[in-house]
Image: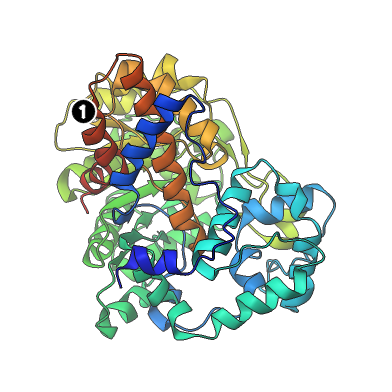
Amino acid sequence: MAPENLARAQQTDQSRLNPDRLFPAELATRTLARALYETVCDLPIISPHGHTDPRWYAENEAFPDPAQLFITPDHYVFRMLCSQGVSLDDLGVPRADGSRKETDGRKIWRIFAENFHLFRGTPSRMWLDHSFEHVFGWTKKISAETADESYDHIADCLTRPEFRPRALFERFNIEAIATTESALDDLKWHQQIRDSGWSGKVVTAYRPDAVIDPEFEGFAANIEQLGEISGEAATTWAGYLAAHRDRRAYFKDFGATSSDHGHPTARTENLSQSEAEALFQKALKGACSAEEADAFRGHMLTEMARMSLDDGLVLQIHPGSFRNHNGPVLTDFGRDKGFDIPTRTDYVRALKPLLDAVGMEKGLSVIAFTLDETSYARELAPLAGAYPALRLGPAWWFYDSPEGMRRFREATTETAGFYNTVGFNDDTRAFCSIPARHDVARRVDCAYLATLVITGRLDEDEAFEVAHDLAYRLAKQAYRL
């Protein structure tokens, strides 16, 4: 049975998912949107940027329980519960030292089920409902009354071989997925995947924030470690750059086609060697001001772009998040625990030094993301509509939603078109939501294309081509997968 048909076979006749969800209300437009969607809904998934754990695919062990699959790794889920006063400890979220106060998956699931109404109208609700039904065949509402029944149903599924990570990977029809690892990671799980002989395509992506950001915890120690694993004198400027080249090559050996940079701002710089070296030495001593740290991060984006000209890695810039906004949560639970907040971001001036240096290079691919939607039409679309090296990433993070995706298309297409964007990526730690997220993106894009056709702005045959490009080809091409 084909993967897409097997997924559908998990459903029952009591489906709770509207088959025309996210399509326009007007009949002619809805009919065309449905026809477009039917040509792309079963295309393979290209997932070029995300945060699933490569250990899952390496060890291929059963997921421990429903709570550890759906709740504890998903900051979309636990941040909503936290906003209503639910303790992260009670949700089993790991603390900074790796310990967990609550380890009973059933207790965690009951809290989730009792508060499931909090997700009404959110994209998380759509992803969860899709996952429950399409992956696990569960079609009843999640509630306090169904908490134990739903937990037992999903837990029973997880004991079966067809619900192990590799089997789900294949059932989801994932053609390629990229995880994201620190520049200091030894990539042992990727090595184990390779040694296993499994045919699933799982590649890594180079995330050097820990050794680029002077404000990253333990920066100087991280540079020492970078030098040790690369065999370069990383505390000198020349050795530091050589160490990055060495690690990028190592990541490429494990399939990496991109680097990923999560900076507070989109600032880039193109400093002289002496200026860059002086900043680097201050960073090693912990003596950089906030302004100098930002300047150093900005210069390193330009250095990474130059390295990309040599090794071909796609450069992703994910700026504009005030990360770890809650100090006590950062102290108790560590980074990435749901308290990253969007900020205003400038791109026109911020990207100019990098674009002056390499923006006209046809062989370079720089993908810019944003958490500042006001910048789409005013800044990012005009920039991507002019510079050959620049492409626009899809609606990201808080705007990975039907409304956010629609706004993205409406704000950027008029200036950048479709072909200066890179399709869709799911950017998730929540494994079972991957097909749900791609389904949402495909539906929203088909709805938008249908509207263009019905209003006379796009030929119907072109709409079918663009639908395929947005769902599959652009991501595969942009990320060189």
Q: Badge 1 is on which residue?
A: 462
**Who's the residue at 29% across and 51% down the image?**
258
Residue 254: x %, y % from top left: 26, 67
The kind of residue tagged 1 is Glu
Colouring: rainbow
Q: Is residue 393 left or right of residue 287?
A: left
The correct choice, above or below, for 244 with respect to 372 in the image is below
Residue 65 visible somewhere in the drawing:
no
On the image, which quarter does residue 4 sit in?
A: bottom left
Q: Tell me the quarter of the image containing the C terminus.
A: bottom left
Quadrant position of the N terminus in the picture: bottom left
Instruction: Place residue 401 in its image quadrant.
Output: top right
Asked which secondary structure carries label 1, the reply is helix
Q: Residue at x 50, y 85 (%)?
A: 160
Foreground pick, 295 / 62? 62
In the drawing, does residue 31 fall left or right of residue 127? left
Q: Residue at x 57, y 57 (%)?
A: 15
